[in-house]
Image (spheres, helix red, strand yellow):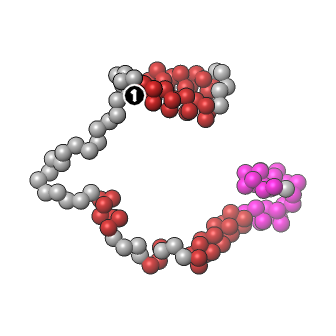
Amino acid sequence: MLVLAALAFIAICFFGIPFPIVIASAALLGFLGHAAGLEGFEASVHAGKATRTEEAPAAHRRAFDRAIPDHVKPTFSRLAKVTAIGLTIWLAPVVALFATLGRQNVFTAITLFNSRWPW
């Protein structure tokens, strides 16, 4: 696996191969290596026999067994509120820089570029 990581690094840095192609190639190589039964490509075993005497449910099972609290249930009003707060936090610095320093200021240009503003 260390060789695969080194080859991925070389492919990206020295040959300029796009990252998605490197990831897809690694996934395909892993699939083929597992299908061929090669050493190092075996699936991990995570669901072994419990070693404790009491069989308490795992933490994620306990979390999903509880009901969703009312303050986090998905509703349209919650969606609108979270969207409004998020847009305000995102747009406030952009609007403040645009209003105070103008469009041609370097900080405004950087802010617009980093916020992917289509102007």
Give the dominant element type of the magenta stretch: helix, strand or loop.
Answer: helix
Instruction: Name the spot of residue 71 as percent of width and height, x first.
Output: 47, 77
Q: In which quarter of the image is residue 93?
A: bottom right
Vertical relation: 56 (above or below) 31: below
Residue type of the residue flagged with mark 1: His
For the C terminus, the quadrant is: bottom right
97 within the magenta span: yes
Q: Can residue 1 be seen in this view?
A: no
Q: Residue at x 82, y 62 (%)?
A: 98
In the image as oriented, which residue stretches furthest toward the front? Answer: 35
Q: Residue at x 36, y 24 (%)?
A: 37
Badge 1: how crowded within 10 Å, few (<14), some, or many (20+)?
A: some
**Stretch of the chain drawn in magenta:** 93-118
Disc 1 target residue: 34
In the image, taking residue 101 as reference, residue 62 lies left or right, namely left
Q: Which residue is drawn at 37% across and 73% down?
A: 67
